[in-house]
């Protein structure tokens, strides 16, 4: 097979007549054409039109095993049966990617003249599409456009022959409607209707993966390194609610991962860069510390990472500051090759669970460790060195000299990794800014806020007076890339009430932060409506079609500009799980670093809308709506309240009866406090907790 050319044509034979439009009836030499009777043509048509690969496989086996099938076609039928079976059950799910990387296509070993050949187009189109969703074209100029053009051609030709197949048409921008419709009673708040739909549909997707992809080993088919990332989009359900099936699946996976041979020392023994080595521990210990905050096993595992950091991974550089010695390390080895010898903004991932443990416990030993580390980054930010503007966090600090950047010629490109953009400034800057904010919160020392403040000033200055095409490495260039700052700034605002960054927040805040700060319900409701619409369609695109488990919710990206269609297709949005997490828990940012989730609702994520409207060390408030028909017992665990006595009140907010539905007083003694109350059916309510 010849590879795809620069124009993305491949070997589909665009421009020439399709030989198989009438299955089995058009060949260059009719005397050599295999005999395909009407029954076999009908079965192939049914197989091609089937949306289900399982049904297609049954029909193909039926054809293959039919004794009247022309013997010359049996090898093709055998090959197709084997390949469809492999698509359904292969480990890993993306078994085809190496061949695609080499050839630009996947060889089924079936000639274009075969009546079975049209069936290969669906699978080849899927394979190409998911490789591009995963890799983006793996750095080859023009590869993304060429491969997606070829994939689109495969789907278009398949849809011509099998027009009833909804999967091929889904890839061509024709959405598959929802399998379930969620009805709402009159008077249900708009936010609750759309949030409830988003949460339930997300839970449906999670449960599909548990039911259909979770293997006896605990894996999901993408490999441990990708499977471990799935919890990141489970967060609104996993951390926001109590869903035993989902909680148990996460616990099973996390324990299985930590019991793998390469994790026997508490961190991987497979050498790679920190972005990849840290995943196998950070992405399995961190969710379990949310789910089992008192669990000794997970606390010990978190502390093990702090031990490795203190005794093995870090040292004092020539400037006297504590920093990581390398971008590449394992539980057994630190690679101090000068090219790789960089601390980076990705390094908080290596100790992500330990940072959460510190946040929860205030451990003094960890306070000393993390403060000393952040001192290095505060110092590097303040310096103007190698052309870096003062006040801008670098993406790397070189070891052992402590200079900003790496051995690359430019401070913003450390060249500490083979992939050209992974550590290129700003890289994973959000991880470091949240770690700095956490350190400020835990120590009370204002110096840890200064990198955030200085970059916020630069960002606001740029937004007020934009610079067109700023030179790389300059302050305007850096400021143009600092849009991510609003997440950490919103957490600072919610945490302290300080308005010092409000000028910046009002320009770039999320819909939830805007709702909390300005009372803008319309923008929030619009965002929830768009999220529900994104999850309402193409369930298959989030489940059975997915081939890479670190890209489960990425299917809608195909319809953005520059993807499957160069101009994009309107109306197919991408789910916003961060929005759902924020509305359910009150955290204006993410759950991964310095989470500020104010509550977890110990109730299933079904038939319920919960919108946190206020939270802080002395208060909590939420709007609630139960879509069911019976009174609902509710339990909630509150996380941000300072020790004191509090009063809880539940009222209906429909204006019918202002008297409280429930009242109680309780005392907060520690970081977690549970409260209970009943929620009436189909009636908008408010929950308030105030300090006495």
Image: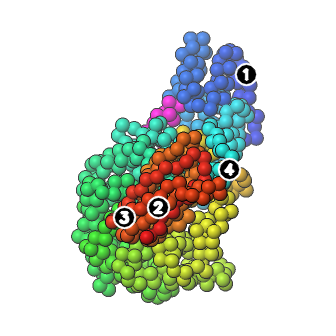
Within the magenta stretch, is there residue 455?
A: no
Quadrant location, the N terminus: top right
Q: Report crowding for label 3: few under 14, some 14 to 19, many 20 or more residues within 10 A (C-alpha).
A: some
Determine the secondary structure under disc 1: loop
For the point 44% across and 46% down, the residue is 243
Q: Report crowding for label 2: few under 14, some 14 to 19, many 20 or more residues within 10 A (C-alpha).
A: many
Which numbered circle lies on residue 113? none
Q: Which residue is mark 1?
A: 25
Q: Which residue is mark 2?
A: 648
Q: CA distance from mark 2 to mark 1?
A: 76 Å
Q: Which mark is first along the chain, 1 or 3? A: 1
Q: Which mark is first along the chain, 4 or 1? A: 1
Q: Which residue is mark 4?
A: 187
Q: Give the number of the mark in front: 3 or 4.
A: 3
Q: Which residue is mark 3?
A: 667
| Magenta highlight range | 84-94
């Amino acid at each position: 097979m010849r590879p795809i050319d620069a124009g993305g044509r491949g070997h589909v034979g665009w421009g020439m007549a399709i030989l198989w439009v009438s299955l089995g009836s058009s060949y260059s030499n009719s005397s050599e054409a295999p005999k395909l009777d009407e029954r076999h043509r009908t079965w192939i048509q049914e197989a091609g039109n089937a949306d289900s690969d399982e049904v297609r496989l049954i029909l193909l086996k039926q054809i293959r095993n039919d004794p009247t099938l022309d013997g010359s076609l049996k090898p093709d039928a055998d090959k197709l049966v084997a390949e469809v079976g492999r698509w359904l059950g292969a480990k890993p799910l993306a078994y085809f990617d190496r061949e695609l990387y080499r050839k630009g296509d996947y060889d089924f070993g079936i000639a274009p003249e075969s009546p079975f050949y049209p069936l290969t187009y669906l699978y080849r189109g899927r394979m190409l599409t998911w490789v591009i969703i995963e890799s983006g074209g793996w750095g080859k100029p023009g590869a993304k456009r060429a491969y997606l053009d070829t994939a689109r051609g495969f789907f278009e030709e398949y849809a011509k022959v099998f027009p009833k197949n909804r999967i091929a048409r889904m890839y061509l921008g024709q959405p598959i409607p929802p399998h379930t419709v969620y009805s709402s009673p009159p008077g249900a708040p708009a936010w609750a209707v759309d949030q409830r739909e988003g949460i339930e549909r997300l839970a449906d997707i999670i449960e599909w993966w548990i039911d259909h992809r979770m293997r006896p080993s605990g894996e999901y088919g993408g490999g441990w390194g990708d499977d471990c990332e799935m919890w990141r989009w489970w967060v609104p359900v996993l951390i926001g609610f109590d869903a035993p099936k989902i909680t148990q699946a996460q616990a099973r996976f996390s324990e299985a991962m930590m019991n793998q041979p390469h994790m026997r020392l508490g961190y991987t023994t497979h050498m790679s860069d920190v972005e990849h080595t840290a995943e196998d521990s950070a992405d399995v210990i961190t969710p379990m510390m949310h789910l089992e905050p008192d669990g000794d096993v997970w606390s010990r595992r978190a502390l093990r990472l702090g031990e490795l950091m203190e005794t093995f991974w870090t040292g004092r550089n020539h400037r006297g500051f504590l920093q990581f010695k390398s971008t590449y390390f394992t539980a057994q080895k630190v690679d101090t090759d000068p090219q790789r010898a960089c601390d980076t903004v990705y390094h908080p991932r290596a100790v992500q669970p330990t940072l959460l443990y510190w946040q929860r416990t205030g451990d003094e030993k960890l306070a000393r460790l993390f403060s000393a580390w952040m001192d290095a980054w505060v110092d590097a930010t303040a310096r103007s060195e190698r052309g870096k503007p003062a006040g801008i966090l670098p993406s790397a600090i070189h070891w052992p000299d402590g200079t900003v950047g790496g051995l690359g010629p430019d401070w913003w490109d450390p060249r500490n990794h083979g992939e050209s953009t992974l550590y290129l400034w700003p890289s994973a800057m959000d991880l470091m800014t949240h770690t700095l904010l956490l350190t400020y919160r835990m120590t009370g020392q204002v110096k840890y806020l200064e990198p955030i403040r200085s970059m916020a000033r630069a960002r606001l200055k740029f937004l007020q007076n934009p610079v067109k095409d700023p030179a790389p490495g300059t302050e305007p260039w850096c400021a143009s890339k600092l849009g991510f700052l609003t997440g950490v700034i919103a957490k600072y605002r919610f945490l302290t009430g300080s308005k010092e960054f409000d000028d910046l927040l009002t320009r770039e805040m999320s819909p939830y932060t805007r709702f909390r700060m300005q009372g803008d319900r319309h923008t929030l409701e619009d965002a929830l409506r768009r999220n529900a619409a994104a999850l309402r369609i193409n369930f298959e695109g989030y489940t059975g079609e997915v081939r890479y488990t670190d890209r489960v919710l990425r299917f809608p990206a195909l319809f953005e500009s520059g993807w499957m269609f160069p101009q994009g297709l309107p109306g197919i949005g991408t789910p916003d799980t961060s929005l759902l997490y924020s509305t359910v828990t009150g955290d204006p940012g993410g759950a991964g670093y310095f989470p500020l989730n104010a509550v977890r609702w110990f109730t299933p994520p079904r038939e319920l809308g919960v919108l946190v409207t206020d939270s802080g060390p002395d208060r909590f408030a939420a709007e609630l709506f139960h879509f069911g028909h019976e009174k609902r017992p509710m339990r909630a665990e509150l996380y941000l309240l300072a020790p004191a006595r509090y009063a809880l009140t539940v009222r209906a907010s429909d204006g019918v009866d202002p008297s409280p539905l429930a009242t109680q007083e309780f005392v907060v003694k520690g970081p977690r406090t549970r409260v209970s109350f009943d929620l009436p059916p189909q009636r908008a309510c408010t929950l308030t907790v105030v300090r006495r």
